[in-house]
Image (tube, coloured by chain):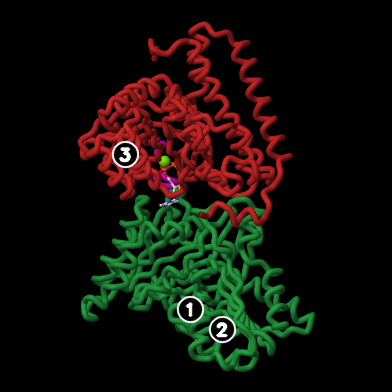
Amino acid sequence: MANKKVSKDQMVEMYKEMYLIRKYEERIYYLFLEGTMPGSIHQSHGQEASAVGMLYGLRDSDYMASTHRPAGHDLAKGVSLKSMMCEMFGKANGCCKGKGGAMHTGDIKVGAIPANAIVGGNIPIAAGIGLALKMQKKDDVVVCFFGDGASNEGSFHEGINGAAIWDLPVIFVCENNLYGASTPYRTVSKVQNIADRASSYGIEGYSVDGNDVLAVHEIATYAVNKARNGLGPTLIELKTYRIPGHSRSDACAYRNKDEEKQWFAKDPITSFRKTLMDLGVKEEDIISLENKIDEEIEEAVEFAIASPDPLPEDALNDVY
Amino acid sequence: MSETTIVEALNQAIAEEMRRDESVYCLGEDISSLDGGYGGAWAVTKGLGEEFGAERIINTPISEILISGVAVGSAMVGMRPIADLQYGDFIFCMMDQLVNQAAKMKYMSGGTVEIPMVLRAPVGASTRGAQHAQSLEAFFTHVPGLKVICPSNAYDAKGLLKQAIRDNSPVICFEHKKLYGGKRKEEGALSPSSVIPDEDYVIEFGKAAVRREGEDITIVANLLMLHRAMEAAEILSKEGISCEVIDPRTLLPFDFETVFESIKKTSRLMIVHEDNYTNGWGSELSAKVAEEAIYYLDAPIKRVASYDVPIPFSPVMENYVIPNVDRIVEGARNLMQS
Ligand SMILES: Cc1ncc(C[n+]2csc(CCOP(=O)(O)OP(=O)(O)O)c2C)c(N)n1
Ligand SMILES: [Mg+2]
């Protein structure tokens, strides 16, 4: 789908961000397999078009609220690669000084509030940020990501209703990747399109192909402009699919192989790469920017490994 | 009789109770292993969907108010639900249903309505960060109307969970992520398996277990800390310090008598829990000893607990915050000096 408002150069920039997320997640996956990284992971590869399409072009002063699967959102919002990688290793110079970990990455300086590991927990918080922006008479906005599973939490209902009645500048983005952990969305809701739920709050809802970054960006641009102009929240449902399991130890026994095949064939990165080439971007140029990103990621890994651990007693700081 | 892990023991307890009593059923997120499902985040309910079907092993939406509320409502009218949480921290999303509804219902109704439900909740730190790590016991030992249990080995897990299912009050069962045993290999995890008898048994609430007899110090510790305390006691015995180690097994009701009996002999008391220091269940035990058994003591009570912080992610900091064997040994040495 061609989008007149996005220039070819901008598309290349978007591609770079998507590629960075993909390679970052793949690298993290191997670091886990090797046993070098502590804890667990919830990865976002396959959903890069959602993160980049929604967040591309936002200001640093706009906010973004993410979930237990935050890497794509954080990178697309501008959290530094090195500080993310350090946090994954629990290092002192991680974006949360090693206190947060994989499920809480973020950097409020670039508008990425710490990711939230309580499913649905970030939805009313996003409404709160929206309320503050309105009270402060700013024209910044909040993009709040959550999954299909989160749409069944009470916090979804309460948060969206609040944003709706007060016309808050919040864009609610439901990444419908068909599953909440092992549970298929179709078994936990009678509403096929989560966007349809918007009508019960009296706001607009849109269901969009979440693997098409330009389609995502088009609806994002609409909803962001609307929010900036004081016209209230929008609920956007992005239909997408995660490539990896829900978490580190998940072999996806609940997904059927045909379904996986169909979705993997709609890989947002391969298809957007092709779009770029169709628009005349030379493959060698794409390869050279890909190589550069690969190097940046290796650098970040080396930097993180060489970075110091926090002092044990640092655990006692930052409580109040 | 066979060697059994905690996961297996819990699974057996649920399966046997479900066979015995039609009104017992399970509900929670991802608890069924039908259609490639997990059988619970910790595999406790694995295989039960196959045996009992989706009507009695109910996969729910991610809706903690629904899970807890449905447990309360169905328990009110004759069912015996066992609700499952993936990580204990999500219990805060259920707080109204547990504290305002489940706990108060019998009392408010003048004893006419009972809520025979169980909620199982894994606690403890395992490098997942602050929202997947908290020890929650003290939030609930404060609530009249609830019962709180915390099995530390497979034999107890089976006997206490069966008792919980048959109990007519709401019971919260705290299980430790690092004690489940089996294939999951978390750093510092143990597999406290037990030989479990073939015949049916339950363990009465409010009966502590003396895990090790000793003369010099009484150590009361639960869940993972019980095991850390046992290790510490072994080290201390080589230094000539003899520890008596008590596992309370249930925190509400709490078996104060067994602790009093022990300190009568040892005159020294140390309390160890992973729940954080301030107002942990050790605070209540300390107060109770101060009120009713202070004259048995020759030294101030010593509490070893997690520091009063949310649980940090970095292993370096997490290991610092959670009590370890060294801290318990150190605490015991100091206690012997005082
Ligand atoms: C309140 C709460 N309940 C349960 C969980 C455990 N949990 C973590 S992620 C997840 C699935 C979330 O599914 P969805 O919202 O669709 O997001 P996705 O993982 O697909 O990105 C569950 C059940 C949690 N973290 N918080
Ligand atoms: Mg999902």
Residue in the foreground of this view, choosing between A202 and B305: B305
Residue B83 percent across, percent down from the top left: 38, 63
Q: Tell me which segment is drawn in magenta.
A: A176-184
Residue with the most extreme front position: A136
Ligand 2, image quadrant it occupies: top left
Task: Name which quarter of the figure residue A232 lies in.
Answer: top left
Residue type of the residue flagged with mark 3: Leu
Q: Which chain carries label 1?
A: B
Q: Mark 1 points at which residue?
A: B284
Q: Which chain is red?
A: A
Q: Mark 3 points at which residue?
A: A131
Q: Residue B209 carries which label?
A: 2
Residue in the foreground of this view, choosing between B32 and B210: B210
Q: In this view, does A114 lie above or below B307?
A: above
Residue A104 percent across, percent down from the top left: 51, 44
Residue in the foreground of this view, choosing between A264 and B234: B234
Q: Which chain is green?
A: B
Q: Same chain, marks 3 and 2?
A: no
Residue type of the residue flagged with mark 2: Ala
